[in-house]
Amino acid sequence: MKQKKRCFKIFWAWQDEKEEHWLSQMAKSGWYYEQWHFPFIYSFSKGRPHGYIYKSDYRPKLSREDREEYLAIFKDAGWDYVMDQLGWYYFRADGEARHTTELFSDTDSKVQKYKQLLKTLTTIFIAVVIIYMAIVAFNPNSYMLALKIIYPLLLVLLLFANLKIMVKIKSIRRLKR
């Protein structure tokens, strides 16, 4: 029977490189990434320690045909599909056999990944603002007190996430020059 392990670890959307490094370190310890569970729980299976490189990409809305083509492109480039969840796709490759450790060699593709993520986070932000204003903000009922605290905190977190993603896009573009 294969040994399994679950780890609780928090990585935010703008910390994908940090997450990828951690997953690669886990593989060097013999723990291969299998699945992500809400909230922030990573599942691993035990194997021989290996120098896998893990990379992630964000593609929120792929049709079945586009998804198959997307996965085939990475497979042809030597990346093995691991899993996908909430628009995030995870791949791994043998780090000892790779000439490059990046999924994308061009800056525009990297920027596109974060632009898609920014679009998703902005949409969620707007939806939360509308819900807050329509239901929570002006409701005098005492049971809304918790939501009157939680929603503004959520809005601050989403605003912070949007700002971090914008800074990341700017830094990637700066490296292009």
Image: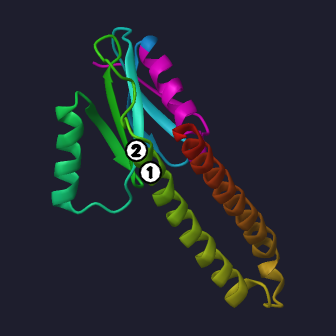
> What's the residue at 34%, 8% (across, down)?
48
* Quarter of image, res 62: bottom left
User: Image check: 10 left or right of 143?
Assistant: left
Residue 59: image location, x then y, percent: 37, 54
* Quarter of image, res 146: bottom right
Decide which of 17, 48 is in the foreground and name it.
17
Q: Label 1 amino acid?
A: Lys
Q: How is the image coloured?
A: rainbow
As for residue 52 lying within the magenta part, the answer is no
Badge 1 crowding class, 10 Å Cα cut-off, few under 14, some 14 to 19, many 20 or more, is: some
The N terminus lies in quadrant: top left
Residue 23: image location, x then y, percent: 47, 26
Q: Is residue 32 visible?
A: no
Which mark identifies residue 113?
Answer: 1
Relative to residue 126, is residue 60 depicted above or below? above
Residue 128: image location, x then y, percent: 64, 75
Q: Is residue 162 visible?
A: yes
Q: Secondary structure at mark 2?
A: strand
Relative to residue 80, is residue 26 depicted above or below? above
User: Image check: 150 left or right of 58?
Assistant: right
Q: Secondary structure at mark 1?
A: helix
> What's the residue at 54%, 72% (across, down)?
123
As for residue 15 lying within the magenta part, the answer is yes
Badge 2 crowding class, 10 Å Cα cut-off, few under 14, some 14 to 19, many 20 or more, is: some
Q: Which residue is mark 2?
A: 57
> What's the residue at 54%, 30% (across, down)?
7
The C terminus lies in quadrant: top right
Whole-number angstrom distance, CA of label 1 to CA of label 2: 7 Å
Which residues, given as a range, are shown in magenta? Answer: 1-27
